[in-house]
Image (cartoon, rainbow, N blue to C red):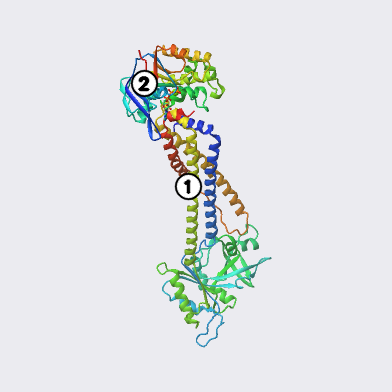
Amino acid sequence: MVRLDKINKYYRVGAHSLHVLRDVDLEIEPGEMVSIMGASGSGKSTLLNVLGILDGYERGEYWLDGTLMRDLNERKAAHYRNKFLGFVFQSFNLLPFKTAAENVALPLYYQKVPRRKRNRIAMQYLERVGLLDWAEHLPSEMSGGQKQRVAIARALIGKPRLILADEPTGALDSETSHQIMDLLTEIHQTGITMIVVTHEHDVAARTQRVIHLKDGRVEADP
Amino acid sequence: MVDLDRWLEIWSTLKANRLRTVLTALGVWWGIFMLVVMVAFGSSLRAGVSRNFAGLATNSVFVWGQRTSMPYGGLQPGRHVEYDTADIAALRRIEGIQYLAPRNQLGGFRGGFNVTYGTKTGNFGVMADYPEVQYVQTPLVLAGRFLDDGDLDERRKVAIIGKGVYEQLYAPGAEAIGTYIKISGVYFQVIGVTGSLRTGGEGDRDLNMITIPFTTFQQAFHAGDRVGWFAIVAKPEYGAAKIEAEVRRVLAERHKIAPDDDQAIGSFNAEKEFGKIQTVFWAIDIVLWIVGVMTLLAGMIGVSNIMLISVKERTKEIGLRKALGATPWSIVAMIVSETVALTTVAGYLGVVGGVAAVEGLGWLIAHMPDSPLGPPQIGLSTAWQATGLLVVAGLIAGLMPAAHAASIQPVEALRAE
Ligand SMILES: Nc1ncnc2c1ncn2[C@@H]1O[C@H](COP(=O)(O)OP(=O)(O)OP(=O)(O)O)[C@@H](O)[C@H]1O
Ligand SMILES: [Mg+2]
């Protein structure tokens, strides 16, 4: 599903550059559920952004489902994000002026699915995350856990092959975190590959494999 | 562009940014409102000026007598210059004159003449004319006919009365043609009733005027050979200015006037006046054009600015849309559509408001006696053109913010907490 080959990434900070990812090699099989752990600033989010084609890299090769992700133009990148990937963020990133249903339906808007059909599908996914009754509510009227469920429904609606979650439980209490992880695990069991960045050991413990990052290097990958 | 879905998306974002939407819309609204009102005001000014000249031949010349200001050929200055029928014959020999209409007015320019019909009396100006005068100032014949050569040749006692005269002397609906009116004791048969192409003061004067044959006038009122003034239409290939000069030269020679005595003969050249008015109209158009473009430009810059601020405020939203699969083009289309929608709707409301204001202005002008302004006009085509212009303006105004929006990187956007 995912193969990283000596990926190197730098951030330009003023005059000098910061080497954030150093020769990262990584292979993730289809249907795997993997977590990435590491100290703050170790490059977890950066790695996830590279995997999500939200960011580029300087050296190495990134193969996604057999295709080399390199020097993509914006249209191609948009296409892969839309059809192949689903994102879940720590801060939910819901559009505040849209209802839960509209937020969930947004990726389908960019697939040019007609509105009625889009809304119908959005309802199915809201039902799946247990929020059917909240469809017409704005994000400001919902709890953190509910917002993250809406975000997960949004990540799922495009039928992605790979879901990338950056600290999906980082803003939630442990009880809610547990429920969100239940949901993610359940989704994983339908066959979707999943990569979760986390600080929490009990979150990492619920994944099949843990990748440790330290100063931009992969530490232990058994 | 006729994608309902996209418009719903635009509507939801415009609604989400209410204050900026209203502010932007207000700027555009005001700009277009002002533009419409100004264009209408220009047309009003034009109509006001034009109607004083309605029906007047553009290449017409008027020549009348004044007083000499220089001694010449042994004659003292201060002499009244008066024309007579011999001058008519002399002017007829001028090659470039197409129509020559010698004229007299009974009772001078101001005073009227006592006119009676049955038991009713009125005081009206009386013009003694040749039929040729109709080529100088087109009469508006409402009933009967205008003068013809037969009237002149036979010195018929016939009269054409203005509508104002008719209304004052006749019962409403009464047949005037064929009846007899008494002008200063002499009976004339009414052969025509005229209105006027002109409005305002000039028009009123036309309506309260009686026209009789020039030759009849001379005989019936013992006016002798006198000719008050000449109304002339120049042949197009000669031009009014040239004929004016030639007529003045001929008359100066005949009346022993110093060639450089400009005071002795008065003349008016409509061509020159029309030219001046054309220049004024042209200037009005230029000013309107400049002001219009400036207003539009100011509106566009305002919209562009606010959209740019809005794009910066919405960095996160745009970044997220990109993460969810929005192409740069779809982001550009979104911002440009928002801008176009905003400018078009606001601008259209501006057109509507402007037209309403113009209607109000028109009502005021219509109810203002002797207004120098004519009815203001703003055509439907102008409104459509303005709307089309707004769409283009919105498009241009949206380009810069849209390009900025499209360049937003999803990571940058999503990092900003
Ligand atoms: N846009 C950027 N410009 C410069 N430096 C950056 C940028 N983004 C990240 N960095 C730096 O790169 C390094 C890795 O950042 P990254 O966000 O990947 O860490 P992280 O492991 O996700 O940390 P955390 O656990 O705190 O989220 C950090 O030192 C960070 O300061
Ligand atoms: Mg991070």
The amino acid at mark 1 is: Leu
Let me know if residue A13 appears in the view: yes
Residue B252 location (% of width, % of height): 48, 80
- Observer-nearest residue: A145 or B244? A145
Chain of the residue that carries numbered disc 2 in the rendered image = A
Label 2: few (<14), some or many (≥20) within 10 Å?
A: many
Q: Is residue A192 among the parts visible in the rendering?
A: no
Q: Which residue lies furthest to the right in this view?
A: B119
Q: Residue at x 39, y 20 (%)?
A: A214
Who's the residue at 56% across and 36% down the image? B19
**Residue B160, percent from left and from top:** 57, 66
Q: Nearer the viewer, residue B84 or B117?
A: B84
Query: Which residue does the numbered mark 2 point to in the structure image?
Result: A217
Provide residue B364's location: percent of width, then percent of height. Answer: 61, 52
Badge 2 residue CB within 8 Å of ligand 1: no
Category of crowding for the residue at label 1, using alpha-carbon neighbours closer than 10 angstroms: few (below 14), some (14–19), many (at least 20): some
Residue at image mark 1: B297
Q: Which of the pair B202/B320 is nearer the observer?
A: B320
| Dot label at residue B400 | none
Is residue B177 depicted above or below B68 in this figure? Answer: above
Q: What residue type is labelled 2?
A: Arg
Q: Which chain carries label 1?
A: B
Q: Toward the viewer: B237 or B314?
A: B314
Ligand 2 quadrant assignment? top left
- Using the image, determine if residue B310 lies above or below residue A156: below
Q: Is mark 2 on a helix, strand or loop?
A: strand
Image quarter of the N terminus of chain B: top left
User: Residue B56 placed where, x, y %?
Assistant: 50, 64
Find the distance from the CA under tag 2 to the CA under tag 1: 55 Å
Quarter of the image where one finds residue A191: top left
